[in-house]
Image (cartoon, rainbow, N blue to C red):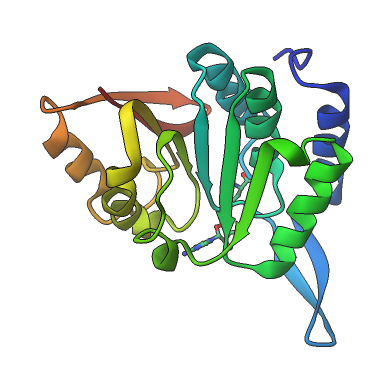
């Protein structure tokens, strides 16, 4: 897949994260700890990027930042369509790395990394959202969906990662229940599995 739609700096930071591999070390409570890095594939990142360029959402919310690999795709596209991204991550150390990665790509001003537990943030979250990328705890997708439903603008997109592979505790079912009311669903096999639902 072509990468020329990504800024050069963004591509470099993405490659740097890829080179570090699946494990990286952090200093936590005076100890060196290893963290397993889960991230989307480069191809899926490009898919997210393309979707944002095409659909031009104004406000994007990411659930599960990790060290900002997927965030870089979201924010690079957001910059191009004059959108803004907020991304929530519970681990402070990961937030710091994500912020530094966005800095390196000169993308910080288009994104806010929020160090919080999503479950404690949903009720007070007051922003309106046009696009959600769900990639935190798969077993809590239903809870996230219910919690952020009040924030969704008409036509909002929910892009939920890995729901065909992992247990999502009724997420697929609840999306389907809402079908025919105000939700359209697309289920696509694209290298890794994902589901995209559109609220009309
Ligand atoms: C699969 S990783 C995210 C990968 C990232 N989106 C990427 O592709 O680069 C999931 C992340 O969600 C975070 N997470 C899980 N449950 C969370 C919660 N309740 N609140 C905030 N973050 C959470 C984890 O700490 C982890 O970093």
> In the figure, 110 relative to 95: above or below?
above
Nearest to the observer: residue 164 or residue 103? 103
Q: Residue reaching furthest bottom?
A: 30
For image coordinates 76% across by 20% down, the residue present is: 6
For image coordinates 80% across by 62% down, the residue present is: 24
Quarter assignment of residue 120: bottom left
Q: How many marks?
A: 0
Q: Please state if 143 lies on the left or on the right of 5 as rendered.
A: left
Q: Please state if 120 lies on the left or on the right of 42 as rendered.
A: left
For image coordinates 11% across by 28% down, the residue present is: 181
Point out residue 3 in the picture as x, y percentages from the top left corner: 76, 17
Point out residue 118 in the picture as x, y percentages from the top left corner: 46, 61
Q: Is residue 17 visible?
A: no
> In the figure, 171 relative to 47: above or below?
below
Q: Is residue 150 visible?
A: yes
Quarter assignment of residue 194: top left
Ligand 1 lies in quarter: bottom right
> In the figure, 69 relative to 25: above or below?
above
Q: Please state if 63 lies on the left or on the right of 92 as rendered.
A: left
For image coordinates 42% across by 36% down, the residue present is: 129
Q: Residue reaching furthest front?
A: 126
> In the figure, 60 relative to 188: above or below?
below
Question: Which quarter of the figure is the C terminus placed in?
Answer: top left
Nearest to the observer: residue 118 or residue 191? 118
Point out residue 177 in the picture as x, y percentages from the top left corner: 12, 38
């Amino acid at each position: 897949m072509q990468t020329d739609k990504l800024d050069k700096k963004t591509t470099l930071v993405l490659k740097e994260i890829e080179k570090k591999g699946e494990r990286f070390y952090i200093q936590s409570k005076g100890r060196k700890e290893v963290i397993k890095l889960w991230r989307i594939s480069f191809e899926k990142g490009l898919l997210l990027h393309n979707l944002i360029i095409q659909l031009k959402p104004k406000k994007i919310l990411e659930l599960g930042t990790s060290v900002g690999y997927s965030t870089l795709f979201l924010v690079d596209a957001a910059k191009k369509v004059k959108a803004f991204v907020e991304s929530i991550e519970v681990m402070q150390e990961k937030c710091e790395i994500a912020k530094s990665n966005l800095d390196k790509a000169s993308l910080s001003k288009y994104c806010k990394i929020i160090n919080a537990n999503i479950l404690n943030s949903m009720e007070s979250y007051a922003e309106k959202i046009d696009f959600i990328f769900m990639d935190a705890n798969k077993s809590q997708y239903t809870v996230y969906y219910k919690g952020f439903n009040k924030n969704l603008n008409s036509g909002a997109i929910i892009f939920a990662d890995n729901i065909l592979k992992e247990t999502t505790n009724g997420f697929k079912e609840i999306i389907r229940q809402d079908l025919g009311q105000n939700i359209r669903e697309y289920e696509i096999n694209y290298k890794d599995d994902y589901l995209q639902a559109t609220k009309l």
